[in-house]
Amino acid sequence: MREIIIRYRGRRFPIGNPGSFYLKKESGGVWLHNSLHWLDEAFFYSETLPTEVNICSTRNENGASAYLGEGPNYWSAIFPMGKVTFLFEYNTMLLKDDMPGGMQRILIGTEGEIRQNYGSDDLILYRKDADKAEMLSLLEDGGDIDPAVKSFQLGIDDFAAEILDGIEREPKINDTLNLFELLLEGLK
Amino acid sequence: MTAHKKYKIGVVGVGVWGCHSLERELLNTNMCELKSVCGGDEFGAGFYDDALAGAKAYAKELNAEFISSAEDIVNDPEIDIVSVMSAPSVKSQWLIQALRNDKYVVTDKPLGLTFDDAMRVCEAERNSKAHGFMLAGYHIRPAVAELLSLIAQGRLGEVKAVSIRLNFTGGIFQGFNPTKRWREEIPGGESVTIGAHGLITAMKLVGAPVEDVFQIRKNDFYREYRAVGADDYAIYNVRFTNGAVANISVGRLPYRIPNEDISIELTGTEGYAQINGTELKVYPGGETFDGKFNAPELLREVFTHFINSISDKNIKPLTSFDDGLMLQKTFTDYKK
């Protein structure tokens, strides 16, 4: 693994109450609320904690107040993680209706690249010495259970097992706190 | 210069790595003719085993005179345009001498090895009756040009953020053998060779000077590059003076991605645009623009534009030396 690129494009979750703490700058906004998901994911791939972060942020305020918190609503963050670099773009500036959304993931290794394009659940593999891209088969799904529900179920099952046997599972709390520290750094 | 006379070209440097023989593109406009060629080992590491013999053969192939001294080309009163195809480490001196003699110049990116090199080139251009063109950036591609047109019309509002991914795929350039000498003659590996295209494109889309750059240059893939201290992958986080930001990732990947060219996302206060390869999509609305192009024909248009900029001072080169100076700043000022 050498490079991880994760991008989100769309707008933030709406908050109808203009006085909500979630819209205040001191809450850290969606940067603090959501970024840990993807930073945690990148750490899962790289297996190395980032040591620093560089962030370029900006703001588009041409939108409905329910989609606008205080402070930036776009972040381009670069996290060096040992041999891996994580480029994370969190773009909640697509404030108008009829705009595209979704996430893009690109994992680049020395032997090829795995990509999930915006709006797609498919994984595409580009491999060295291969002329064509390959569609990767996904892991066994949850049967009749909605994938989003299933993902929460897996996490809760893991946590329950941790309570029962006392063995800490990934992601470990100290690692998560380290990652969170860098997200706080990004607020400066 | 009368309308029917063809511009005479002199060439400084032949077969140097990273140079594209732009004199051929000038000839394809049918408005130029090649007068003389100077080449040899002193102009940079290149693909000829015997650089001097290679340059002589090149001159013969193009029915031009071989000249052993580049001084004689930049001082030749009959030469109108000098094509400086030399390594960045020696390039600026020939650009400067040509401009001091009021000769028009074309070159590949970058303008020199250092920011000071580029500063001196731009100073020479300011004091010259002539000007230069630096081939770099994907803003000349139809899809990007269309996007620039939409931005100019205000369709996307104020540009706030740009992201660009540009990779050359399929391994090390065929026949290229990275050497320490090559590395010493350039300001960076693919961070510069490919990065220049991404950075110039971002600068054109944002339309404001660069204020601040963070960059990571890496060797991810090739031991041949690693052995000479050259990067093969780079990521830039760029802040512009108007508050817009950009991230640019570039690399020379060891695998192929079929049909992939440049990927661009641009968010403005009024909309969002995405370019994948040659296709542009604009939101809201999702209208699509097909920017397929014929590469030789596009280059012919680009160099015709440059030729037209000689006779009409209202026409500006598609990539100016001031753009080259800003580019060089990003290579010099990076913080990592």
Image (spheres, helix red, strand yellow):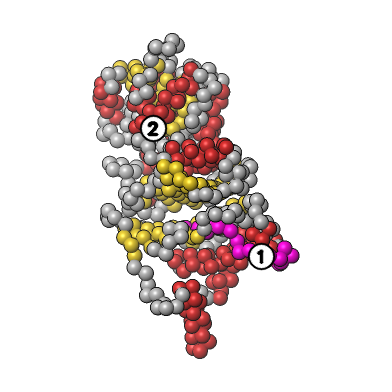
Query: Residue beneath label 1, please?
Result: A15
Point 60% across, 47% down: residue: B270
Instruction: Indicate left or right for B170 with A98 as reference.
Output: left
Seen as rendered, the residue at the extreme bottom is A164
Give the amino acid type for the residue marked by disc 1 in the picture: Ile
Which quadrant of the structure image shows residue A65? Answer: bottom right
Both labels 2 and 1 in a single chain: no
Point 69% across, 63% down: residue: A23
Instruction: Indicate left or right for B193 with A30 as reference.
Output: left
Magenta stretch, main secondary structure class: loop
3D distance between C-alphas at marks 2 and 1:
49 Å
Q: For the residue labelled by badge 1, is the local secondary structure a helix, a strand or a loop?
A: loop
Q: Which mark is residue B298?
A: 2
Point 71% across, 66% down: residue: A17
Give the amino acid type for the residue marked by disc 2 in the picture: Leu
Q: Is residue A9 above or below residue B12?
A: below
Which contiguous range is marked in magenta?
Answer: A4-21
Find out whether residue B316 is within the magenta segment.
no
Q: Is residue A132 above or below residue A164?
A: above
Q: For the residue labelled by badge 2, is the local secondary structure a helix, a strand or a loop?
A: helix
Seen as rendered, the residue at the extreme top is B2
Residue A59 x %, y % = 64, 52
Please tell me which residue lies in front, B118 or B52: B118
Q: Is residue B281 above or below residue A4?
A: above
Which quadrant of the structure image shows residue A12? Answer: bottom right
Please tell me which residue lies in front, A174 or B114: A174
Instruction: Name the quadrant of the N terminus of chain B.
Output: top left
Q: Residues within 10 Å of mark 2 (few under 14, many from 20)?
A: some
